[in-house]
Amino acid sequence: MRNLRFHARHGVMAQERITGGDFVVTVRVGYDITAAMASDAVDDTLNYAELYELIKREMMQPSNLLEHVAGRIGESIFREMAGVTSVDIELCKVNPPMGADCDGASVELHLTSEKTEKTV
């Protein structure tokens, strides 16, 4: 899911918690789509609407740090969506209150499931 936009109340400064700010989230989920390619059945793939609702739920819970929000999103995806093997998350705070002229301040996470097969 690319460039999901949210108005949320994340940040260390008190004003960020009161007025909120704009955030953009991009999530890439690793998932075996072999069955869905053959069956063309929705039950054989991830439900994007459910994924969006999960991300939205975590974005609406205020936190001080982007790292914390992104980590919660990843943990929730692994916990609630069976078959997910990896998650890449980019979370960007648009126009952060630091006096810089920039597109935003971001964190990026690459997470793998404990259930992912490991090779040595």
Image (cartoon, rainbow, N blue to C red):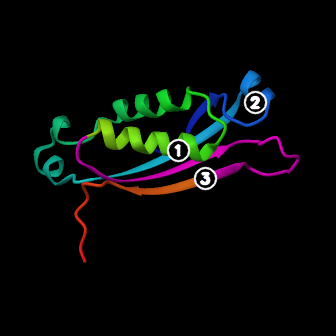
**Label ID, residue 107:** 3
Identified at 17% across, 35% down, the residue is: 43
Give the residue drawn at x 77%, y 42%: 95
Residue segment shown in magenta: 82-107
- Where residue 53 sits: x, y (%)? 42, 28
In the displayed structure image, the side of residue 1 where residue 23 appears, left or right: right
Mark 1: give few (<14), some (14-19) or many (20+) Cα within 10 Å. many
**Disc 2 and disc 3 in contact, CB within 8 angstroms:** no
Q: Residue at x 62, y 34 (%)?
A: 63
Q: Which residue is mark 1?
A: 70
**Is 99 within the magenta?**
yes
Drawn side of residue 75 relative to residue 43, left or right? right
Where 16 falls versus 34 (above or below)? above
Cα distance in 3D space between marks 2 and 1: 18 Å
- Identify the element where label 2 is drawn: helix
Magenta segment includes 10 = no
